[in-house]
Structures are given as structure tokens and as C-alpha cells.
Amino acid sequence: MKADDIKNALAKAKGQGKKRNFSQRIDLIVNFKELDLKKPENQLDFFTALPNNAGKEKKIAGFVDQELLEEAKGNLEFYITADNFKQYASDKKKAKNVAGSYDYFVAQANIMRDVAGSFGRILGSRGKMPNPKAGMVIPPKGALGPIVSRLKKTVHVKVKSAPTFSAAVGSEKQTDDEITMNILSLYDQIVQHLPNEETNVKSVFIKTTMGAPVRLV
């Protein structure tokens, strides 16, 4: 996949249909072939940070205790302290509202057991439990700033049953260079995680929110 081909496809995608009164999202769609997803080793489940924001920054919330409280105040859109876990554990509607309002959750490492006990069922069913592999579980003396900055640009690539994946890679208000960098980065990561790399790629499209798909591969 070449940058010039992506930019040409972007021009086609953006030029379709009538002008909208909002900035449309740009999505990347990857379809797979010869990928037996019944075998766990062929399934994809990883996080990757894009070079630029994917049109809209992810919203990050967290679970902290006193050690990370000041960091949370300065870096998170929302946080819950350990001494308030019980009120959410006893109020499922309140907990579900929080789970649905944020893209990723970080957690202080030494309270993860309490996080799992109070929020595990609700966050787990949404695939939003703080993931150590994605750097979402932070030591009590850790710095939240760099982690939050990275998570705002992070995409969760998950292919478990259907042989297809799609994700936002930008918006019309971003430059073609920014979107192209995001597409190249995300596609490269997906290919690297496939058992037979590009041999497992059937087709690749990009599309705007309201537009028709434009084929890249």
C-alpha cells in the first residue's frame, strides 16, 4: 500500500455525494481471507497507537486511589476513587452509564482487584477492562499524562468471529497527510499480526460516514 494511492482514494471518498454540514469520519475497512477464526491463534486482539488522532480523541476515565489522585485530576476526563467503588457496585445503572461514556479505562495497579470486583462484569462485557498490555494498569507512582496522550490515539483491533475489521482513522477536517499516516500505520500493524501477513488480506476500503466505500486493495 502506497501513500499516493491512499491520497487518491481519499479524494474520491471525500468527493462523493453532497456536502454535509458536519465533518465526516474517515473509516478504514479491512476484509480477510483464508483466516480460520475458529482457531484462537488466528484471531486478532491488540492495541496500537496511531501517529495522529483518529478524527475524534478517545475519552479516558480511570480508577485511582490517593497515590494517583492529583495525576487523575490533571489528565482524566473522569475518575472514580477507590473509596467510591461501593456506590457504583450497588447501582448498576450508574455503573453502566460510566462504562458507556468512555472509550478506555486506566487503573491504579494496587487496586485492580477491587476494580475487577466492582466493575469487572460491566466493563468486561464491553471489552473495556483496563488492559495491562495496552499500558492501562499504572503503578501507584506512575505518570498518567503520557499514557493518556497515547490512549487518545489508540485503536483496539479485535477480530474474533467475522473476517472483517473497521475503525475510524481520521475526519474530513484533518489533512490528507495525517489520515494517510494513520492508515499506513494501522494497516501495517494489522498485517504484522496476521498468520500469513498480506496473504490473509482480501480487500481494503476507505469511506466517509455518509459515503460509499472506495477500494484501496
Image (spheres, rainbow, N blue to C red):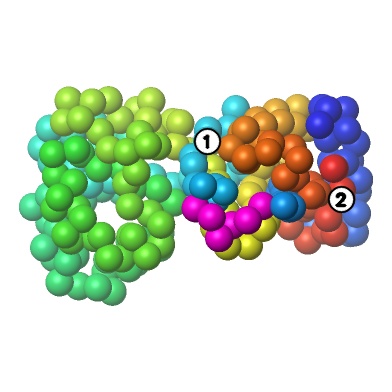
Mark 2 Cα within 10 Å, few/some/many (few <14, many 20+)? many
Please provide percent x and percent y for residue 215.
Answer: 87, 48
Can residue 9 be seen here? The reply is: yes
Mark 1 Cα within 10 Å, few/some/many (few <14, many 20+)? some
The residue lying at 88 percent from left, 33 percent from top is 5
Please provide percent x and percent y for residue 190.
Answer: 63, 39
Closer-to-camera residue (9/53): 9
Prevailing secondary structure class for the magenta stretch in the rendered image: loop
Span highlighted in magenta in the image: 35-40
Query: Is 14 positioned to the left or the right of 140 in the image?
Result: right
Q: Quadrant of the C terminus?
A: top right
Closer-to-camera residue (214/200): 200
Please provide percent x and percent y for residue 94.
Answer: 26, 69
Residue located beneath label 2 in the image: 214
Under circle 2, the secondary element is: strand
Residue located beneath label 1 in the image: 48
Labelled disc at residue 154: none
Please provide percent x and percent y for residue 151.
Answer: 44, 37
Under circle 1, the secondary element is: strand
